[in-house]
Image: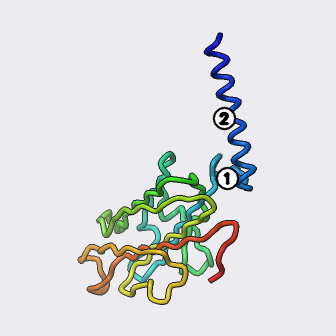
Amino acid sequence: MVAKRHRIMAAVIAGVLLLVALAIGGRSLRSDEGPLALVDVEFYFYPSEHFDVKMLTVTFSDGIRKRTFTGVDFDDYNGDGQLFGTGRLATLPLGRLTVSFTLTSEEGVLLSSGKFDLPLKPDWGWGIDFMPGSHNPLEGCFGCLGAQVFLINPGFRAAPDDALYVVWGGNSISNPAVY
């Protein structure tokens, strides 16, 4: 009987703490992806003559949920085939966002792959761009916070210095900076 009262009391305390956290945070935990979604991430792909969005697979995890998106899950944002994106995807508000990807030819040959982590923090949205080519996209980039270059299989490069540039930037969700 005493153990049952302790469990009930613990559940009540947890509920009260959750309500206090919501009141202090000023944001709802409701989203299209479930509770505790105070942070988001969005993936973009900029195709080139030789690399199509259908070649990309992205897997990401916030420490609890793991999700995978293939090229067919990316929407053509402008209808012109120049920019594809996933839309905003909810994540947990704290911890690490682990992102891994593969770029694979239509024949199933691995062209490039990689993995990286970004910190998760409340009221923050990440934008992660996948950009194949030979031009470093960081030149003149406002709001970019980091990048990593991943080599492309030499047999599939259009130019000797072709690589897959992965660039990330972030912004406050409630009070975004305008670039």
Q: Say whether residue 50 is left or right of residue 45.
A: left
Name the residue at the top extreme.
1
How far is the residue under mark 2 from the one under mark 1? 24 Å
Q: Position of residue 157 (x, y in %)?
A: 29, 80
Q: Position of residue 100 (x, y in %)?
A: 40, 60
Which residue appears at 44% of the width and 84% of the height? Answer: 137
* Residue 14: mark: 2
Q: Nearer the viewer, residue 164 or 41?
A: 41
Please identify, in this view, whether the residue under mark 2 or under mark 1 is nearer the observer: 2
Dot 1: within a 10 Å radius of its alpha carbon, few (fewer than 14), some, or many (20 or more) residues?
A: few
* The image quarter in which residue 49 lies: bottom left
Q: Secondary structure at mark 2?
A: helix
Image quadrant occupied by the C terminus: bottom right
Q: Would you name the residue on which mark 1 appears?
A: 32
Q: Nearer the viewer, residue 109 or 163?
A: 163
* The image quarter in which residue 38 lies: bottom right
Q: Say whether residue 22 is left or right of residue 76.
A: right
Which residue appears at 54% of the width and 79% of the height? Answer: 143
Q: Secondary structure at mark 1?
A: loop
The amino acid marked with disc number 2 is Ala
Q: Nearer the viewer, residue 170 or 78?
A: 170
How many numbered marks, from 0 up?
2
Q: Position of residue 162 (x, y in %)?
A: 32, 82
Determine whether 23 is above or below 168 in the image: above
Q: Say whether residue 145 is left or right of residue 31.
A: left
Determine whether 119 is above or below 11 in the image: below
Q: Position of residue 60 (x, y in %)?
A: 46, 56
The amino acid marked with disc number 1 is Asp
Which residue appears at 62% of the width and 77% of the height? Answer: 79
